[in-house]
Image (cartoon, rainbow, N blue to C red):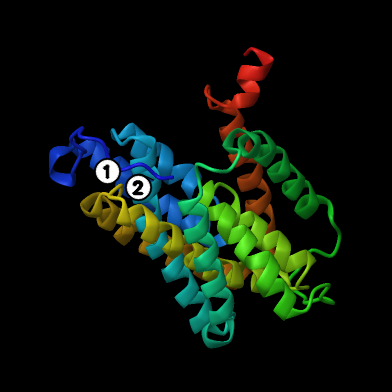
Amino acid sequence: MVERRNSRPCPHVFDLPTEIVLLLAFAAFAAGFIDSIAGGGGLIAVPALLLAGFSPVEALGTNKLQGLFGTGAATLTYASKGQVNLRKQAPMALLAFAGGAAGALLASVLPGDLLRIVIPFVLVAIALYFALKPNMDDVDRAERLRPFVFGLAVVPAIGFYDGVFGPGAGSFYMLAFVTLAGYGVLKATAHTKLLNFGSNVGGFAVFASVGVVDWKIGLMMAVMQIFGARLGAGLAIRNGARLIKPLLVVTCVALAVRLLADPTHPLRTMLGF
């Protein structure tokens, strides 16, 4: 279960050095930009929050706050250009919300170390799939799962993962839309942002309820997330798979390397390095 904030005074915007505030603002903008195209914004935002002095659980909670503004802005940008029908996809977003909330609630029950070992290799596999598979473009193809089954089984499962752990959730949504729903790359990206938004809200609701969200810093970063997300989504709409595909591959590999480089990663402990 998510633990409450401890008694240590947490940093606030006006208590932090100017360079740290600027770092958080830039990190939020970059995270919003990257996340709106290929996912993985947490790879940028969470380390920045840790550097600013937040505990891991505070960094995750505050990241959910600022991240949901970025995914929300990206979703609205894609919707305004006709890439996603918000009303039609609302039931899936609600299922992602439920999955994200359940994942955050049950975080301590799941084998976290097993997830941390497996996820980097899954991300590399996703990168290889998008890099090597031919005809990976913006053309829709035959669906392998009916929308009802996809929404009821796949969406809450990825949302649950987003709530309990998080890194790479956007990439998993993308892979599912392309391989199972038959979406083209741009359409998959647009729908991924909506579901990311749903699971982010679900996880955020739980983190906020137990007091591990810093509202002042989270909302400051949220403003920059919106700017970054709108810019990234606009570029993705104009360039489609030509931009999304290589950025997705790079982001997946970078996220896998970042996870494996963590000195506390269980695989490093197991192998003795």
**Residue in the picture at 20% in, 39% down:** 11
User: Marks 2 and 1: CB-CB under 8 Å?
Assistant: yes
Horizontal side, residue 84 vs residue 136: left or right = left
Question: In this rendering, does residue 244 appear at all?
Answer: no
**Residue in the picture at 29% in, 53% down:** 218
Question: In this rendering, does residue 154 appear at all?
Answer: yes
- Secondary-structure class at tag 1: helix
Horizontal side, residue 182 vs residue 166: left or right = right
Q: Disc 2 marks which residue?
A: 26
Horizontal side, residue 255 vs residue 245: left or right = left
**Residue in the picture at 54% in, 73% down:** 93
Q: Disc 1 marks which residue?
A: 22
Asked where in the image residue 147 lies, by quadrant, the reply is: bottom right
- Residue 155 image offset from top left, x and y in percent: 63, 67
Crowd band around label 2 with a 10 angstrom C-alpha radius: few (<14), some (14–19), many (20+) = some
The amino acid at mark 1 is Leu
Horizontal side, residue 185 vs residue 71: left or right = right
Q: Disc 2 to disc 1, how far (Cα)?
A: 6 Å
- Residue 74 image offset from top left, x and y in percent: 47, 69
The amino acid at mark 2 is Phe
- Residue 258 image offset from top left, x and y in percent: 56, 34
Image quadrant for the N terminus? top left
Asked where in the image residue 224 lies, by quadrant, the reply is: bottom left
Residue 185 vs residue 179, the one in the foreground: 179
Furthest-left residue in this view: 14
